[in-house]
Amino acid sequence: MESERVQKILNGDVLSAAKLIKDIENENPGISNILEALRSHAGKAFTVGITGAAGSGKSTLLGRLVKYFRTNRNMTVGVVAVDPTSPLTGGAFLGDRLRIQGEDVDKGVFIRSLASRGWKGGLSRTAADVVLVMDVMGKDIIFIEAIGSGQSDVDIAGIADTCIGVLVPGMGDDIQLMKAGITEVVDIFVVNKADREGAGSLKALLEAVIDMKERSPAAWKPPVVLTEATTGKGTDELGEAILSHKDYLTKSGELEKKRKIRNNLN
Ligand SMILES: Nc1nc2c(ncn2[C@@H]2O[C@H](COP(=O)(O)OP(=O)(O)OP(=O)(O)O)[C@@H](O)[C@H]2O)c(=O)[nH]1
Ligand SMILES: [Mg+2]
């Protein structure tokens, strides 16, 4: 019975995966054997965390990125939207939007939203298990959307190979930014809503903050990408930045290190 469930998920069966994810969300203790069995098949997917203030455009941006990786890169995609308050504005919303954007249900995309309210185990635990499910289903790249609130930034960094921080002009993000944390965990900065005033100066400020950090010439230096998620402007550049970071992680051996840390988290 258990091995049957495991096999179905390994075959990419959406219904079995959805059921297991529901059990993960409900913290059903009966599934620990299944997760254990799946773990030995994990580690093929590349994972990308997207954090930023509420309303900064994370979901809209994700819609664009999903299309980029499906269409331009022919990769299969998983999306985990972590919504601390309303389960309605997460993945379901994003799924609708993707469909509105002109595609019928695409079998290469698997989207789940998680309501994090009440989790005992916390974001990292639950999201990591859901990412595991999508990984063994065979998704090439998995995105995790979460509102950036200090703690969850750090949580996301524990799960994601690449961490994207989304900022927008005129939201006081520049002040937030000065608080140490963010530049430590973010690999790629996005200034979204670049159609608004102040995008250029926020980008310049970010670049100055990034330059303040001492790093060896071989180390990764976070790029700052301007995007307009509503029109799609900047999506290709962001997609390419993600793939450059993936390349960097692979060649430097850091990807392997991150994987070890993630496995310990599990
Ligand atoms: N002007 C402008 N509006 C944008 C842009 N990107 C997103 N928006 C709008 O910003 C609002 C919030 O977008 P979402 O994608 O839902 O933002 P989010 O960060 O996912 O929000 P939460 O999940 O609630 O934290 C929507 O009305 C979008 O249409 C942009 O580039 N320019
Ligand atoms: Mg959202």
Image: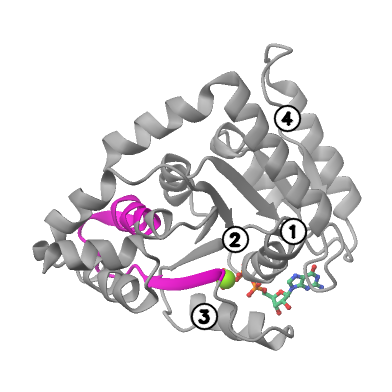
Q: What residue is pinned by disc 3?
A: 89
Cβ of mark 3 under 8 A from ligand 1: yes
Report the label total: 4
15 and 163: which is toward the camera? 15
When asked about the image quadrant of residue 64, the answer is bottom right
Nearer mark to the viewer, of 3 and 1 = 3
Q: Earlier in the sequence, mark 4 or mark 1?
A: 1
Residue at 55 percent across and 82 percent down: it is 93
> Is the CB of mark 1 within 8 Å of ligand 1?
yes
Identify the magenta region: 108-132
Disc 4 vs disc 3: which is toward the camera? Answer: 3
**Direction from residue 239 to residue 124 in the image, left or right:** left
In magenta segment, residue 158: no
Q: Tell which circle, 1 or 2, labels the residue nearer the N-terminal end.
A: 2
Q: Which residue is mark 4?
A: 210
Q: Which residue bears the numbered disc 2?
A: 53
Query: Marks 4 and 3, Cα distance to the nearest angstrom?
Result: 32 Å
Ligand 1 closer than 8 Å to the CB at disc 2?
yes
For label 1, the residue is 168
Q: Quadrant of the C terminus?
A: top left
Q: Is residue 146 left or right of residue 23?
A: right
- Could you give the CA–CA distance between mark 1 and mark 2, rounded to whole angstroms? 9 Å
User: Please, what secondary structure does the residue beneath circle 2 have?
Assistant: loop
